[in-house]
Image (cartoon, coloured by chain):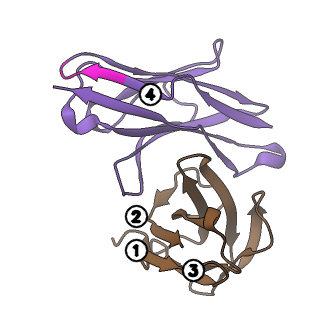
Chain colours: A brown, B purple
Amino acid sequence: KAGVTQTPRYLIKTRGQQVTLSCSPISGHRSVSWYQQTPGQGLQFLFEYFSETQRNKGNFPGRFSGRQFSNSRSEMNVSTLELGDSALYLCASREGPGANVLTFGAGSRLTVL
Amino acid sequence: AQSVTQLDSHVSVSEGTPVLLRCNYSSSYSPSLFWYVQHPNKGLQLLLKYTSAATLVKGINGFEAEFKKSETSFHLTKPSAHMSDAAEYFCVVTAAGGTSYGKLTFGQGTILTVHP
């Protein structure tokens, strides 16, 4: 069974640009969540999608957005990038909101210059 | 509401000695608790989980954790550390009911260093 796949694994952007990250969950998993990980703030929850609907949202500005497609694949977008957006962005999937165990992808490391 | 506190940001041990990573939690509902491990530049991997069955939970790579409701703790232990255990460890809580249903709350992480 393939794991959670995140693309791209590494990317470099400049301030003001936007970025789109992609996440393909484990087959059969319908819930996808996103986390930002930085040395200073640790792991912070961004949002979770289930059946193409955002179910939970963390405390991030509107520049951070996401969506989920009918095949459960998810994308997150960050617009007007700031230096502080440099982070490892982790995607995780689970069967549904009631399932406890998350399976994480390897992450997308974003560097903003 | 729910929260997780990992009591140590860094733990350093010698290879072959015991490991103890401490985690306290708070939850208004019956919690499920997890430990995840993250090696450098990798995603998080599930070590073990507690979901209201046996209070002593065994995980992968020789790790285990004990759920103590009276102490609201879920400490992670391993009898003998190995160099490959060096990583960051996260304690996670999720609630089975209320407005926090399905929401996972992560601790701040504990970096484990293993010396030869």
Distance between the alpha carbons at the discs numbered 4 and 3:
33 Å
Select label 3 or label 2 by which is in front.
3
Label 1 CA crowd tier, 10 Å (few <14, some 14–19, many 20+)? some
Q: Chain of mark 2?
A: A
Does residue B97 appear left or right of residue A103 in this picture? right
Task: Report if the CB atoms under discs 3 and 1 are less than 8 Å apart.
Answer: no
> Callout 2, which amino acid?
Ala
Distance between the alpha carbons at the discs numbered 3 and 2:
23 Å
Label 4 CA crowd tier, 10 Å (few <14, some 14–19, many 20+)? some
Looking at the image, which residue sits at the far right? B99
Quickly name the residue at label 2: A106
> Which region is colored magenta?
B12-16
> Callout 4, which amino acid?
His
Q: Quadrant of the C terminus of chain A?
A: bottom right
Could you tell me residue B107's position as x and y percent? Answer: 59, 37
Could you tell me residue A82's position as x and y percent? Answer: 66, 70
Q: Could you say whether the residue bearing mark 3 is in a helix, strand or loop? A: loop
Distance between the alpha carbons at the discs numbered 1 and 4:
27 Å
Quickly name the residue at label 1: A9
Q: Could you say whether the residue bearing mark 2 is in a helix, strand or loop? A: loop
